[in-house]
Image (spheres, rainbow, N blue to C red):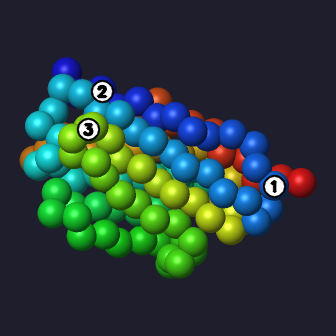
């Protein structure tokens, strides 16, 4: 079955950086789109960044210029490099993929930006 396992979350001060990783298994990773979503307390889950199987990317306006999504097909892993973090980036970050009508999610990793 499809498994997505996130890592790399934690507590960071405003202006700091973190890199999230998501290791995928149970799929032919290279042909799947991948993405990162986040959900803050009391809010809906929103798209942060998306990368296609061919490497095309798109980002939420709130993270453009600060976050970078990338993928390593040899390692079945997608990354989210987060720079210049702000308190409003605090959320649980979820890894995502999909195939046809099925969506798959990781368990989430907490990112807290606070001084």
Callouts 1 and 2 close, C-beta under 8 Å: no
Q: Residue furthest right?
A: 115
| Lower sequence index among marks 3 and 1 | 1
Q: Residue drawn at (47%, 72%), measured in percent from left and top?
A: 60
Q: Which mark is nearer the camera, 1 or 2? A: 1
Task: Indicate the secondary structure of the residue bearing disc 1.
Answer: loop
Q: Which mark is residue 76?
A: 3
Most distant residue in the front direction: 74
Q: Camera-side residue: 88 or 52?
A: 52
Q: Secondary structure at mark 3?
A: loop
Number of callouts: 3
Q: Is residue 4 above or below residue 14?
A: above
Q: Which residue is mark 2?
A: 3
Residue 23: x and y in percent read 35, 34
Q: Mark 3 and mark 1: span between their CA atoms?
A: 30 Å
Q: Identify which residue, 17 or 91, lies in the foreground.
A: 17
Marks 3 and 2, the one that precedes in the sequence:
2
Gap between marks 1 and 2, in whole Å?
31 Å
Residue 107 x/y as whole percent:
46, 30
**Alpha carbon of mark 3 to alpha carbon of mark 2: how far?**
11 Å
Residue for point 15% across, 63% down: 54
Q: Is residue 102 left or right of residue 35?
A: left
- Residue density around tag 3, few if under 14, some if 14–19, many if 20 or more, within 10 Å: some
The answer to which of 100 and 65 lies nearer the viewer is 65
Which residue is pictured at 46% across the width and 65% down the height?
68
First reached walking from the N terminus: tag 1 or tag 2:
2
- Considering the image in quadrants, where does the C terminus appear? bottom right
The front one of 54 and 95 is 54
Q: Is residue 110 above or below residue 38?
A: above
User: Disc 1 marks which residue?
Assistant: 13
57 vs 79, left or right, is: left
């Amino acid at each position: 079955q499809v498994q997505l396992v996130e890592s790399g979350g934690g507590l960071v001060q405003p202006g700091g950086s973190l890199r999230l990783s998501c290791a995928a298994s149970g799929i032919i990773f290279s042909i799947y789109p991948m993405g990162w979503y986040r959900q803050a307390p009391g809010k809906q889950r929103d798209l942060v960044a998306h990368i296609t199987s061919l490497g095309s990317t798109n980002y939420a306006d709130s993270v453009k210029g600060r976050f970078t999504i990338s993928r390593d097909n040899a390692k079945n892993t997608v990354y989210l490099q987060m720079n210049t973090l702000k308190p409003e980036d605090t959320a649980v970050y979820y890894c995502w993929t999909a195939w046809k009508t099925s969506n798959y999610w990781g368990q989430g990793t907490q990112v807290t930006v606070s001084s």
